[in-house]
Amino acid sequence: MPAFIYFISFTDRMNKMKVRLIGLLVLVCCKQYAFAQIDNSVLTQNININETDSGKAGFNVNVLNYMRNTEYFNRIELGRTLFGYQVNPSVSYQINKHFKIQGGIFARNDFGGDEVYTQLLPTFTLKTNYHNFQMLFGTLEGAASHRIIEPMFDIARVIEHRVENGFQLKYKSNQTFFDTWINWEKFIERNSPHKEKFTAGLNYMRLVTPQLNQFKCTLIGQGMISHAGGQIDKDTINPFTMQMNYAVGTKLGYDLRKNENISIDFYKLFYSETSSSGLWPFEKGDAFYTNLTYQYQGFNVVFSYFYGMNYLAPRGTAIYQSQSIDVPTRFESKRELFIPRLIYNKALFNELQMSARFEPVIDLNTNFFDYSYSFYLSYQLEKIFK
């Protein structure tokens, strides 16, 4: 473990801030290490299939109240505020113990917006569950439910792109989480003036130590493809594009006692553009990303470190990118960030949960300091009619 901590200090120009950071990581990691990553469980959404509900109808409502404020003044991402709510009422019918249909309406309202609703969309899902394998067709269990790391998948997508439609195949057991999907974002007809667009992804997480052990080790592989193309469009301006992101990683953890653990997870990330479109400043890049977490009940203290060279991720959180989201001609080949986070997750009562977060961002290249804070209230109700 000390060798790993030494590895993350590989930059030639180590200043005093970096020395303090490395020292802190060594101090904590030399105690014991544990199993976890940034806990976004409050933001996930799943369609339940229970054998005892066969032949029964149900009513479901999912509500997410959000306030995410990024006080960013850096060259890569300028800050903004997302403040509002989402509501998704739906009805369901479980045909048998393996098969369920569910449909409803998704509405998103951003406070102070020009329109009554920022988004108003139908949702409809066919879901099967057989021996831990789950298949979804229609509206997916998307956004934070994919469990993709932030440099590859933006945490704000749970607000701005909550509804994903397409196909999804999942496998969930006590030791394995597998999720692969395709989110069809732009449909085209013949002679459409724009390209078709989709995102495909995969997440595989395998616990390789016994489940009940205090020490846990999990192997991780993640990948995403972002595509714009097609054969029947008449878009002669925008070229065909194909961008790929993938990551391999490991989580190590140790349970100190009930509801208390310490953990570290680290990843090697890669970026490539296979279409040679010339739209982006880099065709290849890579990065290193790690989170050191102490968790006690609902409190999470997380120290995140990111080092990227020519790293881009079209669906990733903007702050990690080497290209500015606000001024595309502006880029920084090397990005090195330290993000100390304080997160508190709490189940308030019944189906209501909250998450409060404070996340400073320190640019280790420029010593520039930004921060963000966010607050979420999630209410998920499922009522099965007898």
Image (cartoon, helix red, strand yellow):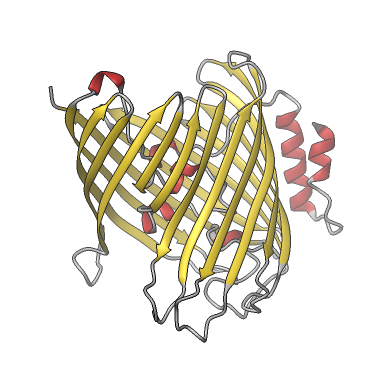
Residue found at the very far left of the displayed protein? 386
Residue that appears at 49% across and 37% down: 39
Q: Quadrant of the C terminus?
A: top left
Counting from the top left corner in percent of width and height, residue 103 is at 23, 45
Q: Quadrant of the N terminus?
A: top right
Horizontal side of 302 relative to 136 (left or right) equals: right
Horizontal side of 240 relative to 138 (left or right) equals: right
Can you see residue 365? no
Residue found at the very far right of the displayed protein? 12
Query: Is residue 69 positioned above or below 236 on the image?
Result: above
Residue that appears at 42% across and 34% down: 134
In this rendered view, identify the residue nearer to me: 265 or 22: 265
Quarter of the view holding residue 51: top left
Quarter of the view holding residue 366: bottom right
In this rendered view, identify the residue nearer to me: 353 or 176: 176
Counting from the top left corner in percent of width and height, residue 101 is at 26, 39
Quarter of the view holding residue 334: bottom right
Counting from the top left corner in percent of width and height, residue 25 is at 72, 37
Query: Is residue 84 positioned above or below 378 on the image?
Result: below
Counting from the top left corner in percent of width and height, residue 13 is at 84, 59
Horizontal side of 237 relative to 350 (left or right) equals: right
Query: Is residue 327 positioned above or below 77 on the image?
Result: below
Residue that appears at 50% across and 72% down: 230
Query: Is residue 290 positioned above or below 300 on the image?
Result: below
For the image, the number of numbered tags is: 0
In this rendered view, identify the residue nearer to me: 342 or 122: 122
Residue that appears at 52% across and 15% down: 258
Can you see residue 50? yes
